[in-house]
Image: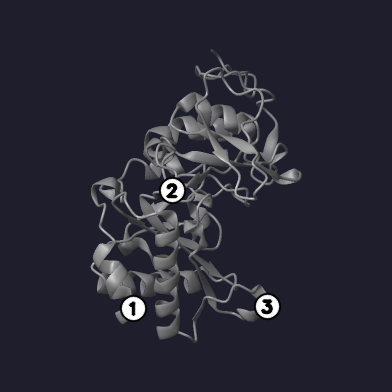
Amino acid sequence: MKSASKNGQRTKTLPIKVSNPDKVFWPEEGYTKLDLIEYYEMVFPFLAPYVKDRMLSLERCPDGMLGECFYQKEMPKGMPPGTPGKRIKRSDGSGKITNYVVGGSLATQLALANLGSIAVHIMGSRASSPRQPDWVCFDLDPQSEKFSDAVRAALYVKEGLESLDLVGFVKTSGSRGIHVFVPIRVGPDADEVLRFAQEFVARVAGAHSKELTVEHSIAARGDKVYLDPFRNGFGQTVVAPYSVRRRPKAPVSTPLDWAELKATLDPSSFNIRTFAERLKGKDPWKEFFKSRQSLKDAFRSVKAL
C-alpha cells in the first residue's frame, strides 16, 4: 500500500499504512516518523539477519525526542495479521506468559517503527532455541562523554579475545558506547555464556584496572569504562546492528571494521540521513555468521588470561 504524503509528495510503496507520517520525531534535525520508517525499509536487507527468528523487546517512543518512552515485551495490538510471536514463561515465578514479537519480516519492522519503536532491541538467541545464544555480547559503557575512552576499552577487549583465539566484531552502540560481539556455535546454555562473559570482563578489567571496571554500582565506577557482561543473561537484549537510537542526530548503531575504530571517530556521523552512503561500501560484518566459534576451549582458557 502507499504510505501517506510527505511534504505534499506521495512516497514510495510501503507494506504498511503509516499513521501521522509527518510527525516530527527529531525536531532539531526535522526528521519525521516517515523518515525513520523509510530508513528501516532501506536498511532492512542488512538488518534482517540480526532480527530473524529473534524475540524483540520494544522501546516505544510515540513522540520521538519530544516525549516519554516506555518498554514493552508483550506484542502490541495493531501489528499486521500473522506477525510471528513466541510465548515465554516469565522468570518472576508468576507463571504468566509473555508473547514476544519475533523479528524477521519487513512488515514487522515497519509496523514497530510506526508504533514509535525507534530502536530495535534483540535477544542473543533465536526464538527456536531461546536458551542457547549464538553470540556473546560485551557492552562497553564509558562514564565520561569521551567516545575515545570506549575505543580504548574495545581494543583491550579485542586483545583479550585474541588471546583466546576468538574473533570479535565491533559496532557503535548508537550512543556513547561500543558493543563487541563474538559469534558462537549454538550449544552452551545462556547461564554458561553469561558466566564466561563475566569471567572474561573481570580478567580484562583486572589487567587495566586504572581504565576499566566491572563495578555494577554506577557510583563506584568513577570515570572508568564499565565492561558489562549482563547482556548475555537469559531474556536480556542489546540494540541490533543498524538500529536507530533515540538520541540527537538520529544515530545508527553501526557495524565497523576494527581499522575504523579510532579515538577521533564521531559515532553520530552515522545517522539516518547519512547511512545510505555508507551502505554503498563494504559490509564489515559480512562474515559474521560464517565466523561462529566454539567456546569450549575459551571456557577453559579464560582463567589463564
Residue 131's disc is 2
Q: In this view, does 169 lie to the left or right of 153?
A: left
Q: Earlier in the sequence, mark 2 or mark 3?
A: 2
Q: Decide which of 58, 196 is in the foreground and name it.
A: 196
Q: Position of residue 172 (x, y in %)?
A: 46, 57
Q: Is mark 3 on a helix, strand or loop?
A: helix
Q: Which of marks 3 and 1 is nearer the N terminus?
A: 3
The residue lying furthest to the bottom in this view is 210
Residue 303's disc is 1
Give the amino acid at mark 2.
Arg
Q: Is residue 160 left or right of residue 228?
A: left
Q: What element carries label 1?
A: helix
Q: Decide which of 3, 173 is in the foreground and name it.
A: 173
Query: Residue at the spot x=41%, y=73% of the render?
Result: 199
The answer to which image quadrant residue 66 occupies is top right
Count of numbered circles in the view: 3
Q: Are marks 2 and 1 in contact (CB under 8 Å)?
A: no
Query: Residue at the spot x=38%, y=71% of the render?
Result: 157
The answer to which image quadrant residue 88 occupies is top right
Give the amino acid at mark 1.
Lys
The answer to which image quadrant residue 196 occupies is bottom left
Q: Decide which of 297, 184 is in the foreground and name it.
A: 297
Q: Which of marks 2 and 1 is nearer the N terminus?
A: 2
Relative height, residue 198 to residue 14 (above, below): below
Relative height, residue 30 to residue 303 (above, below): above
Residue that numbered label 3 is attached to: 219
Whether residue 305 is visible: no
